Image: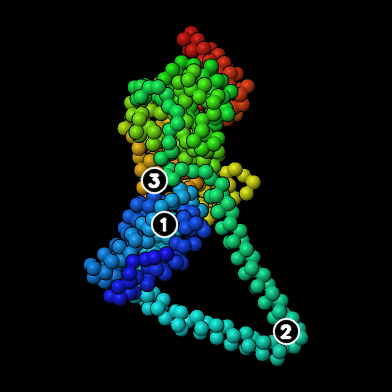
Amino acid sequence: MKLIKLNTNNLFPTIQFLFCFHRFILPLMNKEGNFIVFVHSERFIASVLKVLTPYSMGTDSTRQYYHNLVSAIFQNKRHFSNISPTATIQIYILEKMVILFCSFSSYLSQLIVILPQCVIPNIQNLLSYLWLRLKQAILRRTRFINICCMVIIFCSSTLLLHIYMNFSFNAKKAREVTEAIFAPYNFTDARILLTPSFQQCPSVPVFYIIRTHPGNMRWRSIIRSTWAGSLKHSLIFVLGVEKVGEVNELVELEAEKYDDLIVFDMIDTYNNMTLKSLNILSWIVQNCQAPRFFMQGDPDIVAFPDEIALYTSKLDANLIAVYGKCWKGAKAHREDSSKWALNSLIYASVTYPTYLAGGAWLFSPATAKRLLMALEKPLSYVHIDDMLISGIFAELMDVRRVCLKTVGYLYEFSLKKCRDDHILAVLQLEDHEILNTILDYREASIECYAARSS
């Protein structure tokens, strides 16, 4: 890789940064020279420069040279023109390393200069000397002590090997997860292949957005014929594609008939669910500001539009908040067999922040815009979209999470009993449970209304 010509007046900060680059950045690149971490190139440059600014040593010209060096590296077209949007290592670790090295600039620079000439040969000599003394010490001991020494050495070596193999496996697994994700260049620049005929969203109390797979035509039909039957032009289904750039012929016919599909040019897989959700937020910010609130959900739910409209009518649409079923203190899955598995190299914490179940959650246009602003920060790609957006993003951007007892799972509700608060949505239902849930709730509502009126 060609870097800009070195200036001897700026030798120490230059060597210092090159050490950072080769030690901590090159390992994050694949063999094609592309990052295996998610970064927007311009944003990442700005982020690195922001970190370096207070710690740069020397005169103004030295700092300017230093910054030019960073820009030259990260704007190299041959190596950095196609930066992958997926991540295996949180990018803030790199920033912390840069801060660390810049804080001890003078000391580290001198150390790095003498390292190849002095330290490495001395380390080799030291190891040879220690091994020689170890052999001499063992040979002077009794046979029993010799055996004990060998056992200790063997156990120590085995432990070190186990630690190394475990770390290598985790790194390899993280890369495999990353390579399995089919994603566009950017989190939010997926091309729209199909869209409803209306140019702007209608000014309605609540606009419904349901994420479905292209092959889930049955679920979409169930939704249209049950709880969403009255939501003409207030509901859309968001799909990806099964092959990049191509829309299934049946999906095209369905879109022509119902005029309620948006198709993004991105492979529709579970690992890409985050990309779909973020592109939905981007679409809202750019094209759909008229509704007071949005309800984003999955197809396997029952929502009650009248109850949701009544609830949201009492809310302030300018309040930056998300509303739904909360998960608090949920533990991160590490099992490889789980579809929710999240490698510790991607997310190190044992527990997740409080987040909302992605099956059904409410938010305003202002909240969508605030959540999307989290992409300005360098973050790892996490395929668990509800945890990332309503958990990590919400914490980063000071978005309030409002936990609702009226959104939940079927086993949490007694549909045939009178309730003071009306149910807004029931999550994770089988297709045969959809209609029964609606009928049971409506029947109970009528009976409760009659009982209260008498």
Residue 217 place in picture, x, y as percent: 56, 24
Badge 2 element: helix
Instruction: Identify the residue at image location x=62%, y=88%.
Output: 133
**Depicted 391 relative to depicted 411: above or below:** below
**Depicted 205 relative to depicted 387: above or below:** above
Q: Nearer the viewer, mark 3 or mark 2?
A: 3
Amino acid type at circle 1 is Arg
Real-space Cα distance between discs 2 and 1? 60 Å
Residue 189 place in picture, x, y as percent: 41, 40
Amino acid type at circle 3 is Leu
Residue 118 place in picture, x, y as percent: 46, 84
Q: Is 283 left, or right, of 412 in this rendering?
A: left
Q: Which residue is disc 2 drawn over?
A: 145
**Depicted 162 relative to depicted 174: above or below:** below
Which one is in front, 222 or 217? Answer: 217
Q: Which mark is residue 78?
A: 1
Q: Which residue is disc 3 drawn over?
A: 375
Q: Are marks 2 and 1 in contact (CB under 8 Å)?
A: no
